[in-house]
Amino acid sequence: MVKLNPLSLLTRSFQHGVHPQYLKEQTQDLPIQRVPFVENYVMPLGQHIGVPCKPVVEKGQRLQRGELIAEPGGFVSVSLHSPVTGVVNEVDEFRTFDGNFSQSIEIKADPFAAQEPAIGPAIDWESMGIDDFIQTVQAAGIVGMGGAAFPAHVKFSIPDGQQIRSLLINGAECEPYLTNDHRLMMERPEALLKGAEIVRQKLGAEEIVIGVELNKPEAIEILHQHIKPGDPVRVESLEVKYPQGAEKMLIRTVFGREVPAGQLPRDVEVNVSNVSTIVAIADYFDHAMPLIERIVTVSGPGVSYPANLIVPLGTPVRDVLQFCGGLKDEAMEVIMGGPMMGKPIASLDAPVVKGCSGILAFTEEQTLKRREYPCIRCGRCVEACPYFLNPSRFARLARARMYEEMEEYSIFDCVECGCCTFACPSAIPIVQLIRTGKDQLRNTQASAK
């Protein structure tokens, strides 16, 4: 049994942050299971940060599971593959989880197909140069699967003159309710360690560090059991605090290094990747299986049977919930992601996408809006902000529609973690106001260009 000493972490953590309840008990001990295949799948072309991919199929075309259906639209873009064997039903605008319409490919599954992926032989990654490796990861459609969906190959593209010394695997999973990464570490540690070693060698890093919060002792123990003596891998037990899983906070906790505002982890010789992303890389190089499915935690007091599920991309949220017994009568809201950074789902017919780490159903007790009071200048939002910003100032500027002034106070350094809203005693929706301000700023800047 691995002995964990929380006291050893007190001098190595990031400053500020908050301590929401874990609320992981519903699913942390539930093994991963697979949902049945359904009739229709919708694959939005913009499932990642960056340029949407471009369709390479047309209506009526027959597809095999794992077949390419859209190619990258630029460097900051990835490929898209069919999650099922079937026929292209439509290439058109479909509603996504945020209520907007997005260019998508609808696929009607073949009810008589076995739906086995076209698994190929293992890919020889050891003989690949870094450029070939980057192109292969892009072609596999792999993105950061912690929620942001940033193309993984872009993270692995290190500019000349920079060096990566440490590959940091993010297993913190600090959002309440979510347990998909926890279960992956427990059930597939070999794949995680293999994927990490592939990336380590391609980046030329000296070590692999896996950061796991202390509320996952079983995962920490299993990882220790699978690390062989002499392997360049170590597991770091992290203080349980939100947002421990944010890149800059994780680097500060593990290495004691500060990533300056406006810079990236690679500027301090670190590359950060999520547990699910690393496992997806291992799966691709082992079986040539592109990213066509992901693990999703379905939980919350409004769902009948919580679960950790392997879900084909494009599956309607409604069908995932039905597999879990459907919503309870008292369910009031469903969100995609975690409760701190996730967003409400506008329609249950919206598809599961690459960045969907969780589907959470809440009742009136969790969604009842508290009465909002004027700001009392208590400073709790400032004390909670891990980026040392002044959230209350952003909120006031956003309400006054002084969006340009928000940029002067480094609004784009905000990652919208929600610590400020969580800490505010006046129930001011600070992070929502910040999101509005950032959207308005981006629109203004785009119009100016």
Image (spheres, grey):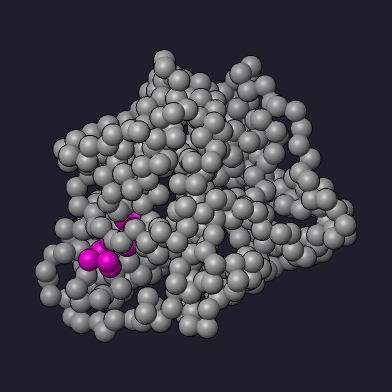
Q: Residue at x 18, y 60 (%)?
A: 382
Q: Residue at x 45, y 53 (%)?
A: 28
Quadrant location of the N terminus in the rendered image: top left
What is the x, y in percent for residue 206? 40, 19
Q: Nearer the viewer, residue 284 or 222?
A: 222
Taking 418 as reference, is 261 above or below it?
above
Q: Residue at x 31, y 52 (%)?
A: 243
Q: In this view, does 339 lie to the left or right of 128?
A: left
Residue furthest front as drawn: 1
Taking 167 as reference, is 67 above or below it?
below
What is the x, y in percent for residue 85? 81, 52
What is the x, y in percent for residue 7? 17, 39
Q: Is residue 114 left or right of residue 371?
A: right
What is the x, y in percent for residue 138? 62, 38
**For residue 95, which quarter of the picture?**
bottom right
**Residue 290 visible in the displayed image:** yes
Q: Which residue is drawn at 66% across and 30% down?
A: 286
Q: Which of 305 and 10 is in front in this view?
A: 305
Q: Is residue 42 left or right of residue 370?
A: right
**For residue 38, which quarter of the picture?**
bottom right
**Residue 416 visible in the displayed image:** no
Is 418 included in the stretch rendered in magenta?
yes
Magenta region, residue range: 414-423
Taking 78 as reference, is 284 above or below it?
above
